[in-house]
Structure formats: C-alpha cells, structure tokens
Amino acid sequence: MNLAERDQQVIWHPFTQQKNRLPPIPIVKGEGTLLFAEDGSTFIDTISSWWVTLHGHAHPYIAEKIYQQALQLEQVIFAGFTHEPAVRLAERLLPILPGNFSRIFYSDNGSTSTEVALKMSIQYWWNKGETHRKKILAFKNSYHGDTFGAMSVSDRSVFTLAFHDFLFEVIFIDTPTENNINSINAIIHEHSGELAAFIYEPLVQGAGGMKMFEALLMDEILNSAKLSDIICIADEVMTGFGRTGSLFASEYLQNKPDIICLSKGLTGGTMALGITACNDRIYEAYVNDDKYKTFFHGHSFTANPLACSAALASLDLLMKEECLNKIRWITESNKQFAEQLIGYPQVKDIRTKGTILAFEITLGKDEYLNSISTTITEMVMTKGVYLRPLGNTVYIMPPYCITESELQKTYEVTEWVLSELA
C-alpha cells in the first residue's frame, strides 16, 4: 500500500467527512512556500497551513534553534521549575504586546489559550468575591477553538451543533456597524453587572469566514465594556504576528485588552504553543494568602523548551526589516489584486486586511458546508496552488517568504478558477 492507502486504514483527519472521503495527498517535504507531494507535485501553500506558517516550511534558522535546544533540554515540568527559553520569550513578548501586559501563561495551542483566558476572567471575579459576574460576552459568527469553553463562546454553528446542550450560556452580540452600534452598547450596559468578560477576534473573524469590521466601531464597544469594568480578551490567535499588517490587530485600537491569546504564528508554525498574557489587574487577584485562590490550571507540555525556542527564532525572523517589508508588500499586493477582482460577477464582498485577502463566491449558499470549497481546492491544485476556502469564502493568507512570482501565480490561478466557474 502507498502512504495515502495506509493513512486511510488508521487515521481520522480533522474537519473531514469520513464517508466517501478522498485519499489524502502525501506530503514528503516542505520548503519556503512550497509543499512537495509524494508523486513529485508541488503546491504553493497560500493559506500558511491553517494560518500558522509565517516564514515558510522547514526554515533552517528555526530548525537549527530547535536542534540546539533539543540537545540541551527537551522538556521539564513547569510547576516549580523554569528554563531560559520560557523566560526569554516572555521578556521579549511583553514589551511588544498591544497593552500593559505583565505576565505570560503558557499552554499548548489556540483553543487552550482561550480556555485559560476564560478561566482567568471568571476566577478573577470569584477571587474578588463578586460571584454574580460569571457570564461572557462574545460576537456572533465568532470562533475561538474546539474545547468546551472555547466552543461555548463561539457562534452556534456547524462546528458546535452536536454539543449545544453542553455549552454554557453566552450573551452574543453582532459585530459593529454604523446601524447597530447603539443597540450593542445598550446590551452591554443592560448586562454589565453580570458580565465577567468580553472575548473577541479583533477586526477579523477567521474561521467564521474572514469577516472584517472597522477599528473605530470596535473601539466604541471596547470603551463601553471598559466603562462597565468588563475584562476584555483579545483572541489574536490568527491575527497576531503581522497578519493584519501590524504586529497585532489590537494596535489599530485605542482601547487595549486586559488579556490576549496567542498561538498559530507564535512559533512560525513549527511547534504547538499557546500563550495567554494578562495585565497586573488580572494577575494581582491571584496573589493571595488564600490557597483556594490559586489558578489551578496547567498542561503537561506547558512552556515546552523546544516550542519556546521555536517561538524565539520566529520572533528573530519576524522583527527583521526584511520581513516587515514583506508584510507591507503583501498588504499592498492584496489591495491591488482586490481591485482586479471587482469585475467578476460571481464574486462579492471583496475585502483585505494586511496579508489577508478574502471574498465570497456567489454560487450556492453562504455557508461552511458549501461544496464549492472542495471544487475550488481540487481545481487550483491542478495548477500547483493550494487554497482551502471556508465554504464559499475564498481567502489568501500566504507565508511572508512568498516570492513575487509565487504570489503572482496565486493571483492568476485564482482568476483562472473564477473564469472556469463562470
């Protein structure tokens, strides 16, 4: 049996319908933006392998740093011990995060980083003796992960359908527009006394379909939340590390979060790692003689030294002027390509934010289960490009190492598939 056949005998892949599923494509190597298949085919990874790969696949600098760390210390329990990579990563991150953050809490991935944030917020009020503040405010159409707390604060959708009876109650609001901003602020005021926290994806809702909204209106909501003393949690798992043009999407906002969640691009896509950073206000509620007010949360691989080393290496690359210039170049290229897409009748709601470009295909329903996504993926892969639409939402979010010819090919293949669909 070949690798794909062996896979089908033993593997259950994520977000994949199991009956009549197509054989997975065996990937044997990655280099830069390219994925190399077992049969010799290559694909430009235009979605950064689920938005994690910042600097390209198998980056030699990150690989070397992981190797060096593996020879020294690969893992140690993080309760009672510490190590250089974890401390150094926290020291480097805290000054560049968008807000007055003072502490870093490590976990394993994006979903666990939001779980930590939710638990921190709820226990914050419990520690303060204000146990009536236990509800969470969140946006409709949001996605914060697949663990139960993260699902609870995500939109009730195909992702959560089987679990609705098990999810805790959340107050959901629309993302802001000029028409609804007053009603949103009224909801916040109405429930202010019972709200523990507001969790949000700043400016771009990722898995919900790359929906974008204005910073000015988002600031109005955050201002209302802060006036009501509601803890603000920015889920920057996807938007962090340059994806929106700035290092963090919260930099576009005047009102900064109390807690920020990071993962995905944190390690350049090399290792699994999650971070939840908080300000002193949150942290000080846990500095107490009462042992019951301890934050009883952790993971076996909390602050894994290899993952922290990968994150430090990724930061080295990210902060170079060459990389920052590439982010600016991708941003401008996307804006120009968005103008080219305007003439296609089967395209609507073309939008860009930094290195993210997205639009809707008007064929079929506007939903995640729209089969047009599979059709588009199969078509563009015949041309050496990998796109994986979110239902009828097509998006491009490339690694920062993408070359001019690779990005141009991505645009050309996108236009080709639109012409074919017409």
Image (cartoon, rainbow, N blue to C red):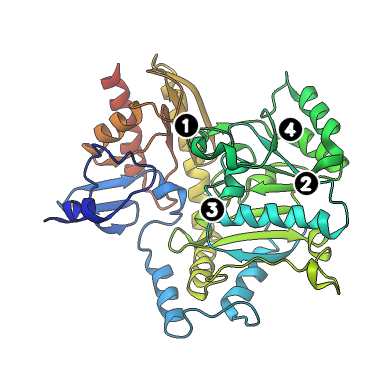
Q: Mark 2 or mark 3: which comes first in sequence?
A: 2
The image position of residue 359, as x and y in percent, is 46, 27
**Mark 2 neighbour density, 10 Å: few (under 14) some (14–19) many (20 or more):** many
Q: Quadrant of the N terminus?
A: bottom left
Instruction: Kindly identify the amino acid type of the residue bearing the numbered disc 4.
Output: Leu
The image position of residue 284, as x and y in percent, is 83, 65
Q: CA distance from mark 4 to mark 2?
A: 28 Å
Q: Mark 4 or mark 2: which comes first in sequence?
A: 2
Q: CA distance from mark 3 to mark 1?
A: 21 Å
Q: Mark 3 or mark 1: which comes first in sequence?
A: 3
Q: Mark 1 or mark 2: which comes first in sequence?
A: 2
Mark 4 vs mark 3: give the one in front.
4
Quadrant of residue 203 within the rendered picture = top right
Q: CA distance from mark 4 to mark 3?
A: 25 Å
Question: Mark 4 — residue?
Answer: 216
Q: Is residue 420 visible?
A: yes
Question: Mark 1 — residue?
Answer: 358
Question: Mark 3 — residue?
Answer: 324
Q: CA distance from mark 2 to mark 3?
A: 40 Å
Instruction: Kindly identify the amino acid type of the residue bearing the numbered disc 3.
Output: Leu
Asked whether disc 2 touches disc 3, contact meaning CB atoms under 8 Å apart, the reply is: no
Mark 1 vs mark 2: give the one in front.
2
Residue located farthest toward the front when viewing the structure as drawn: 165
SS under mark 1: strand
Mark 2 vs mark 3: give the one in front.
2
Mark 4 vs mark 2: give the one in front.
2
Position of 56 with respect to 350 (left or right) is left
The image position of residue 251, as x and y in percent, is 69, 47
SS under mark 4: helix
SS under mark 2: loop
Instruction: Kindly identify the amino acid type of the residue bearing the numbered disc 1.
Output: Ala
